[in-house]
Image (tube, grey):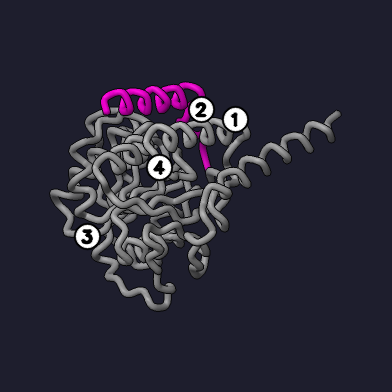
Amino acid sequence: MRAFMKNLVDRINSFFNEEMVGRIPDNLLIPYKDISQTSVLPKQRKIANDKDQVFSHSNVRVIIPTLNERENIHDIMYRLKNMGFCDILVVDGHSDDGTAEYAQNLGAKVILQNGHGKGAAVREAFVESLSNSQADIIVMMDADGSMSPEELPSFIGAINAGADIVKGSRFLPQGNSEDLTLTRRIGNKMLTMTINFLFLTNYTDLCYGYIAFSRNALLQLSTRLIGQAFEIETEICVKAKTLGIDVVEIPSFERLRRFGTSNLHAVRDGLTIFSLLLKEYLQG
């Protein structure tokens, strides 16, 4: 019985991976070096290889919302700094484990968020970045160690190739996740199908927050966002579509959270995301 159930779960996981990848026309799959071997680009724009990409690290800001992530933030900061990224903004939700102080000691700019929830932190980070940073590219990533800083050149390369927003996808070829449970995988699939049906989009991964923005795109988008929690990622996708902002997906590999437990509640947050999609659709 145990072997049967394991086989069933493997078959379901395989189905969802193949179904999502199958949505992408073959002629839009563009070879890319390193972790991002495949990118979905409008008008088949070509991305240069990493060795051909030239960008200034000072032109990139990385924003990281945190809540009790002291054990994880050290590794992320070390890897970002080692790659040459020094403009790092941590927006802390009043952690009680010393995350804010620790991140500041590691060289990050730290602000304590006024609101509550990931969405509020992201929105505050956008406002601060547009006001006080000269960076032309702003990247948001999680603090739990699941998103690899080493993928950043792929996101930056796509922005430099002309994309307005670059979104990581765990369901493109060369993308994957060690962290998605079957429940979350199915929920993400259903929500992705919903946004694609309602808004005539072609996203492959809705609930993933590794996203890079050009400054101009963020100027258009930031004032339209109101999300308070994990629905912020979905709101970005919806409002980018309604504003006519060009969104590109590239493969991303999500690793297991390194330390601690997630603040995500799959059912509750899934229902919030579904409600947001319906509300945005009805408001036209």
Q: Amino acid at mark 3?
A: Asp
Residue 270 among those drawn in magenta: yes
- The magenta segment: 259-284
Query: Disc 4, disc 3: CB below 8 Å?
Result: no
Q: How crowded is the residue under tag 4: few (<14 C-alpha within 10 Å), some, or many (20+)?
A: some
The residue furthest bottom is 52
Q: Check disc 4 and report its element: helix, strand or loop.
A: loop
Residue 150: where, in percent of width, then height? 45, 62
Q: Which mark is residue 201?
A: 4
Q: Which residue is mark 3?
A: 136
As measured in the structure, the alpha-carbon distance from the residue carrying label 3 to the one carrying label 2 is 34 Å
**Answer yes or no: do the residues labelled 1 and 4 have beta carbons within 8 Å?**
no
Counting residues from the N terminus, which is met first, the one under dot 1 or under dot 4?
1
Q: Which residue is mark 2?
A: 266
Q: Main secondary structure of the magenta part?
A: helix
Circle 1 residue: 183
Q: Residue at x 34, y 48 (%)?
A: 140
> Between 250 and 25, which is closer to the camera in this rendering?
25
Of the residues under marks 4 and 2, which one precedes in the sequence?
A: 4
Foreground: 189 or 118?
189
Q: Quadrant of the C terminus?
A: top left
Q: Earlier in the sequence, mark 4 or mark 3?
A: 3
